[in-house]
Image: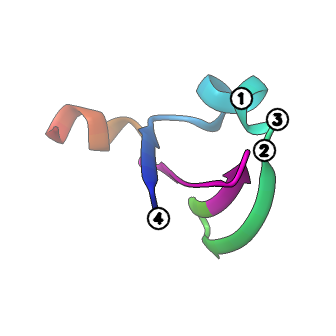
Amino acid sequence: MDILIVTETFDVLKNFISQLELEENLGHNYARFTYQDQSLDILITGYGGSIST
């Protein structure tokens, strides 16, 4: 993982994710993507994650 993106919902990043190539699905709300030779992990925490942070 080079970059980790944490978001509340999938809808927030829907347009961004459509430009990425799925590398590996790591769980229900966690996946690894590639974009221009960079590895990006995306974690969807739901609303509680951002409140905790």
Neighbour class for label 2 at 10 Å: few (<14), some, many (≥20)? some
The x, y position of residue 10, in whole percent, is 64, 37
Quote the CA–CA distance across marks 4 and 2. 15 Å
Instruction: Please report whichever mark, 4 or 2, sits nearer to the chain's N-terminal start.
Output: 4
Q: CA distance from mark 4 to mark 1?
A: 18 Å
User: Percent position (x, y) of residue 45?
Assistant: 42, 48
Q: Inspect the magenta stretch and tell me whether residue 53 lies in it.
A: no
Residues at marks 1 and 2, CA–CA distance in whole angstroms: 7 Å
> Which residue is more in the foreground, 44 or 16?
16
| Amino acid found under the numbered disc labelled 2 | Leu
**Foreground of the two, 21 or 7:** 21
Mark 4 or mark 3: whose residue is earlier in sequence: 4
What is the three-letter code of the residue carrying label 4? Answer: Met
Query: What residue is rendered at 55% in x and 35% in y?
Result: 9
Task: Give the residue at mark 4.
Answer: 1
Q: Which residue is mark 3?
A: 19
* Of pointers 4 and 1, the one earlier in the residue sequence: 4
- Residue type at mark 1? Phe
Which residue position is annotated with label 2?
20
Magenta residue span: 32-45
Kindly identify which numbered label has been placed on residue 16: 1
Q: Residue at x 45, y 57 (%)?
A: 2
Would you say the residues marked 3 and 2 are in contact, meaning their CB atoms lie under 8 Å apart? yes
Mark 1 and mark 3 in contact? Answer it, CB < 8 Å: yes
At 42% across and 42% down in the image, what residue appears? 6
Alpha-carbon distance for marks 1 and 3? 6 Å
| Camera-side residue of 1 and 48 | 1
Q: Name the image quarter holding the C terminus.
A: top left
